[in-house]
Image (tube, grey):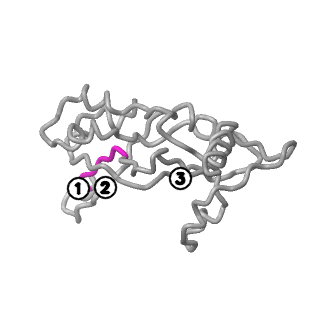
Amino acid sequence: EDDFVQDRRAVRPARPPSVAPGAGAGRSRKSAHKLPYVIRHRDGSPLAFAGLWEFWRPPDDPDGEPIRSCVIVTTEANDLVAPIHDRMPVVLPPSAWERWLDPANQDLAAILAMLVPAPASDFEMYPVATLVNDVANEGPQLVEPLPAPPPGSELQLAPEVHQLRLAEDLEAR
């Protein structure tokens, strides 16, 4: 467990969810090719990440301007994400939203119990173009799936990525 989350002070501030249509991940495992990936719910619903935020002042400047801090809590990767990264954001299921958002909920054990990897079966993941690595780029083309590499190619991707894409392509036909 993260020392930050284990610290009771970290769970006392507001616990907002950070909502997004999907998450991005770069391949952090040892690989000659560094491809970015999109990870999203299979049903297209938004992801609600466990977040923490608070106002604080630096210890060396107690009279200074308050600083707003926000963090998305991470956990170990589930089976889908593990081939490309060892960590992933905590994605809260709708059944946990009320408990996470309740400022009166100070039960550390119950809060920590929510900080687990979401089931891999809830998600799809696919590689996207490296255009996403430049903040100047915008548009829907940034999350368009890359085609599977040709057999025997040097480009080695997680096999489940290609299985998911193949299944989607077959369903679309």
Whichever of callouts 2 and 1 sits on the residue coming sooner in the sequence is 1
Q: Is-magenta flag for residue 52?
A: yes
At label 3, the amino acid type is Gly
Q: What numbered label is drawn on residue 69?
A: 2
Q: Residue 5, position in %: x, y?
A: 32, 36
The residue at which mark 3 appears reads as: 24
Q: Residue 6, position in %: x, y?
A: 31, 31
* Foreground residue among 65 and 30: 30
Residue at screen point 39% across, 34% down: 2
Confirm or deny contact between disc 2 and disc 1 (CB under 8 A): yes
Element type at mark 1? strand
Whichever of callouts 1 and 3 sits on the residue coming sooner in the sequence is 3
Tell me the distance, in whole angstroms, between the alpha carbons under discs 1 and 3.
Answer: 27 Å
Whichever of callouts 3 and 2 sits on the residue coming sooner in the sequence is 3
At label 2, the amino acid type is Ser
Element type at mark 3? strand
Q: Residue 20, position in %: x, y?
A: 40, 55
User: Which residues make up the magenta segment?
Assistant: 49-57
- Which quadrant: the N terminus? top left
Q: Residue 101, position in %: x, y?
A: 21, 44
Residue at screen point 62% across, 41% down: 164
At label 1, the amino acid type is Phe
Tell me the distance, in whole angstroms, between the alpha carbons under discs 2 and 1.
Answer: 6 Å
Tell me the distance, in whole angstroms, between the alpha carbons under discs 3 and 2.
Answer: 21 Å
Mark nearer the viewer, 1 or 3: 3
Residue at screen point 23% across, 65% down: 65
